[in-house]
Image (tube, rainbow, N blue to C red):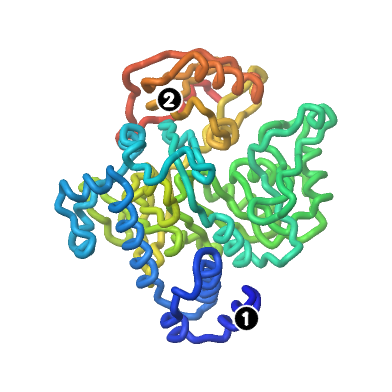
Amino acid sequence: MSIKRLLRVLGRINDLQYISLSIKHYSGKLLLNIRLLMLKKYHRGKFVNFKRIRNKKLLKTLKYAYRNSQYYKNAFDERGIKIKSIREDWGRVPFLDKSIIRKEKDRILTMSDSKSYVGFVTTGGSTGEPLGFYTFGSYDAEHQKFLYQLMGYCTGDKILAMDGTLVNDNLINKNIFWTKKSTKDLPYGSVALSSQYLNSNNINYYIDFIKKFKPAIIRGYPSYIDSIAIYILKNNIDLGFNIKGIQITSESFYDYQLDNIKKAFKTKVYTQYGHAEASVFGYSVDDSLMIYCSPFYGYTEVIGEDGTHVKPGEMGEIVVTGFNNYAMPFIRYRTGDIAIYDGDENGIVKLRKIYGRTQDYIYTGNMEKILLTAIVFGRHYKAFDNIEKWQIVQNVPGEIIFKIIKGSNFSINDQLELQDNFYQLAKIKTEFEIVDNLPLTPRGKSKFLIQNLLI
């Protein structure tokens, strides 16, 4: 039976038939598509309890990690944790954080990193703690398509990525600030309109491109899209076409930005929460902006300062267990992001508000704003794997200081990589200070940017 025909059939089954569906007949992406279809129906009013499926995937992840990861086998054995009684033992499962991953990377790894299908990912991290890790297995594309469908996506719709993608210098010299991103619009857009080069002198080219391209859906950084929205509103610009929705991602946002974006583009705004560690996929379905965490992507907790789960309405740290990275399982991984917990609804964890994502700016010599999400968090630097922690300080326009707690393998090449990229991307000069520690905020976190310019 083809996937399309199967999904048509599934559209007619009831909840009892769905729950009793024998999953051994289906696997991988096909099974996920079946489940995402039911999740879509759930948000349209059809009741399904996904808790059983989520718990089964969680148990499978724990069994796999125990059998294949030396780190998890030792961690479970030392604490007397039994997979069979994991409901009672769950609170004793140790948290994972960036420092543990850097130290125990080889023992967490469950398969040889020499395999061609095992990838290596680096992330800058919104709290200034870079990380490198191995990955295999991801269902981002399927979840992203699911979210677009909630927004009204149809085959053939154009998706525009408004992110930090680099554009060739030859195009920049012609006032072309966009580039082909993919041959397909799913899952991240076929064309990228880059935030790297936006300023007051060229913003009209950005507007003209959007009007000409006519995207059905826009996906990108909220602060960047807000800059475009403000210009549209101030100049009373009519784009001349309808947009089905705008998905904001990769950084925190403010209510006034959402208002600007809604008014300028005359559409709904949807949020998406995730990270490079690929252990959570959160999404909103309406203007309430309540974040729902996919029960097929990972298990999400919100932990208080005492290490126990908070109650609905309380604030805590987001802790996630990913279901799909079979190369390097992340179990009870501390994201560093703060959220207000809103309960567990039929296996779907809800988050009322997420904090902790940065949208700080640094400034060039002529006082143009440079978004750090694009220049740092939107890039993958090899140096990230050799840095324990870092902080950017700006005292002078066009110049920054990197304060770095270096890892054992940090070298001059890592320094040159950062120095060259910041200058090439933004004409920002860099200095480096190797330090033993960085000051903490009242919440105990290291602030990534110390901006001393009085703007």
Q: Are marks 2 and 1 in contact (CB under 8 Å)?
A: no
Q: Quadrant of residue 53?
A: bottom left
Indicate the position of residue 186 as horizontal and vertical percent values.
67, 56
Residue depicted at x 48% and y 75%: 25
Which quadrant does the N terminus fall into? bottom right
Cα–Cα span, label 2 and label 1:
50 Å
Mark 2: secondary structure:
helix
Which quadrant does the C terminus fall into? top right
User: Which residue is at the front of the view, 263 or 364?
Assistant: 364
Residue of label 1:
8
- Horizontal side, residue 111 vs residue 1: left or right: left
Residue depicted at x 35% and y 57%: 61
Residue depicted at x 38% and y 51%: 339
Work out whether 451 lies above or below 259: above
- Horizontal side, residue 8 vs residue 154: left or right: left
Residue neighbourhood size for the residue with mark 2, other residues' Cα within 10 Å, grouped as few (<14), some (14–19), many (≥20): many
Q: Quadrant of residue 439?
A: top left
Residue of label 2:
386
- Amino acid tagged 1: Arg
Label 2 vs 1, first from the N-terminus: 1
- Amino acid tagged 2: Asn
Mark 1: secondary structure:
helix
Indicate the position of residue 333 as horizontal and vertical percent values.
34, 47
